[in-house]
Amino acid sequence: MQSKHRIQITVNEEEHDLLVHPNRTLLDLIRYDLGLTGTKEGCDEGDCGACTVIVNGKVMTSCLVLAVEVDGAAITTIEGMHNGDELHPIQQAFVDSGAVQCGFCTPGMILTTKALLDDIPDPSEDEIKHYLEGNLCRCTGYTKILDAVNIAIKQMK
Amino acid sequence: MENYSIVGKRIPHRDSVEKVKGSAVFTSDIKLNGMLYGKILRSTVPHAKIRSIDISKAAKLKGVKAIITSQDTPLVKYSISPTWADQMVLDDQKIRYIGDEIAAVAAVTKEIAEEALDLIEVDLTELPGIYDPLEAMKEGAPLVHDAVRNNISKRVTMECGSVEEGFAEADLILEDTFKTQAQSHSSIETHCCIATCSPTDDVTLWANSQSPHPLRQRLAGALNIDAAKIHIITPYIGGGFGSKIDLDPSQAISVILAKKTGKPVKIEHSRKEQYIATRMRHPTITELKFGVKRDGTIVAKQAKVVMDNGAYNSHGPAVLAYNNVMFSTLYRVANIKYEGCLVYTNKNWGGACRGYGDPQASFAQEVMLDMIAEKLNMDPIELRLKNANIPNEVTANAVQITSCGLKECLTEVKERSQWEEKKINPKKYRGLGVAAMIYTGGGSIGSGSNYSGATLQMNADGTLHLLMGAVDIGQGSNMILTQMAAEIMAVEPQSIRLTTADTDATFPCMGTFGSRVTFCAGNAVTQAANGLRQQLLENAAEMLEANIDDLELKQKKIFVKGSPHKSLSYAEIGAASFYRKKKPLVAHGYYNGPEEISPEFDPKNYRGYPAPSMAFAVQVAEVEVDPATGKAEILCLTAAHDLGRAINPLLAEGQIEGGAAQGIGWALMEDVQFENGKIVNPNFHDYKMLTIKDMPKISPILIESIDPNGPFGAKGLGEPAMVPTAPAIINAIYDAVGVRVKDLPATSEKIYKGLKEKELKTD
């Protein structure tokens, strides 16, 4: 039986002190140990981006990250994007553009968009597509997701 | 055109806020006290007899709470229809494909359950496998289901008029063969369910099902328990596209494990399981023979189809019959012959997949028409206009068409895509291709039923509550159905409380498939809303001592026309009804149509198919081919869709764009690849789907033909969105570089090979 390790992480500005098995993924920790189920599991293999979170400012597919690797890190999940009922401009843009159908890829898309606009406030279409290429969507055909990102860029200027 | 204030408006989906916040609950997000995790032992060989299963070692593993085999099930066969039941939850005799369920474990963690699977010992006698449907039909081929001769699960044959006479009259006859590949739905959310069983044997199942009400019946049948003891709740669903309609073995297994352990049991498919063990689009081989007059009139058409069923029926027999309906009903042709067979193989099985046999039919027919247009030196759009269906006609195969915007789709798409200008001045390596389609716009009563129910009630405080069985799988039904009710009741759509898809709380709905929800559930909802509106008016007339004809509804109040001070709020009417009178304000709506069924309806081959409305569409693809690599890039896709009336144009566009992405994927890159029955690309990196980088510009056109039987004139759109895409692209590639790909997907390799072959011919 593997022994647990102690990690301290900040998730959406809230501090957590946890004991985890070494093979616990960050995704499972977020969803099942912290009960933050907005981050989704789509493949558990790092292909679809549904599990995207932001760790120390960098976008990561949490299914490929071990919880012990992020000891001491500051993590943002989808639940950290809005302030109560006040949506982040990116979230509002997704709502207004019709960019949300089934909604399963949506948290990952929004977080990658946040990382994009934090890095490049006025990205070109190629830069937008380069960042979002790792987030798969099967419902929307991406068209209105692109619309949403463009609206968010304007709103956030 | 009527002037509506809510129907026809671009309003963001009411569910979007929850979804962007991450608070929308999907099945896997649910955690129950004492919940166990179920895992299924699946076959790693394609065809075998099961001799014995030894679970003793696995049962000793700490944390394992139950292990089941076929002996824990009633050993009854089921399918979506009892007439072709061929599948068991856990088969006691045979394994028929790689992925077939053998046993299942419930344990305190997923990891322990997986470890236990490795400890189950299965003694098998491997049998020779059969993977090619053409080989499977031959005498002496291994039989997938022992009682089914030649592995032919179903034959569909239909003749209208005389194709021999038709061909004799033709000025030109063309014959060719077209092949299509298996496509995986690949919804980002996999199958997931959680079952609980109370000490009084009451089962609750949370499942991401597109049809919870029928699922309840199927589950009852497969497990030999009373349907009345089963309660199914559908949380939000992360995409379905047809994959989540059937009773999935995992759902039955979770119930059995819950009963055995007395604990909640969650089973969630891994992505690999989703690829290998959930249904796919049926691959097809279609031989076509078309006869036309010099002026483009199609005088006869004939199709011979072999459809690869895989190991189990699922929706197969209906998909084959749909392939017939869609091939035969599109265009005004008097002489038609269709022969199709559905053939078992030892592979993952075909099922309902967006379009349900129509993409396969459209692909073959629309590429053939393009070939005919070329030979006749006729514009492909003109050729289609020549043969286009018209409103209210009855086709040669006895299908009643009501509204029909096919001609408008053709003319609009021609203009928007700049067809004429681009054809006159073609750019090198660029081309335009067109394809049309027909599909059911409101499901059909052909299987016996086409039901959807709804209840609209007013609470004592005047708020409205809509309860309906229809499931929103992302396509937007929650929004457009409340828009319909809101229009009739003069309230904001978001103010209507919504309860959906709960078998204890909502009237049955057959499910979200067949592009039927807008039409069928819409009819139920409008019926309920009109009923409630009438009750409201009657109450108000009495309370205001006014004539019912003098009253109007506006912003949650009822006014006497011309006397705005004489009004009552919905809250006042609601309170009066509940607290002073004895009658609550509630109305029901139920649709199960169409009422009239053609006397020619044949439930075997679907001649005279009783669909309440048909949807039409035409798409034009503009493509550029890189001659150095053969890669086809879509520059633009113009899509004109006759949807009756667009209840919400924002959501309708979303369906077209999403459908186009799946159609482009099927045309160019998606392919479930098998090697001796094994799927070699069961993941997102090897099964190629479109990413945001691959998506071209889409130009949607909404054609409103206003169907006489549709709610506010609306018809379905979800599946039509992807049907004509692939043939439009194939035709565009031919227009660009003269390479005609007749077997999908049109990969770069195939196009490049075609280019090289062309070069050799001209050298």
Image (cartoon, rainbow, N blue to C red):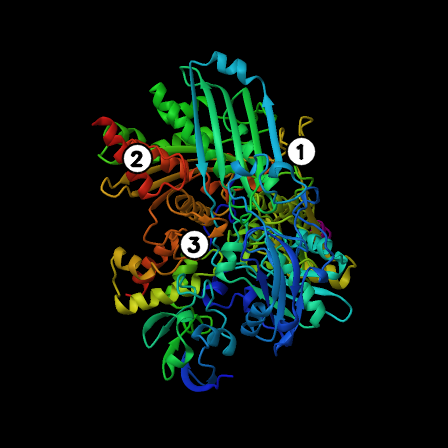
Q: Amino acid at mark 3?
A: Asn
- Magenta stretch, main secondary structure, is helix
Q: Position of residue B329 (x, y in %)?
A: 54, 28
The foreground one among A54 and B631 is B631
Q: Which residue is mark 1?
A: B603
Q: Position of residue B162 (x, y in %)?
A: 57, 17
Image quarter of residue B703:
top left
Identify the residue position indicated by label 3 in the image.
Answer: B681
Residue at figure coordinates x 47%, y 61% from the top left:
A104
Q: Identify whether B55 is placed above or below B96.
A: below
User: Rounded to the nearest whole Å, what is the CA distance between mark 3 and mark 2?
Assistant: 25 Å
Q: Residue B687 placed where, x, y %?
A: 41, 53
| Viewer-side label of 2, 1 | 2
Q: Which mark is residue B754?
A: 2
Query: Residue at left 33%, top 35%?
Result: B732
Label 3, residues with CA under 10 Å away: few <14, some 14-19, many ≥20? some
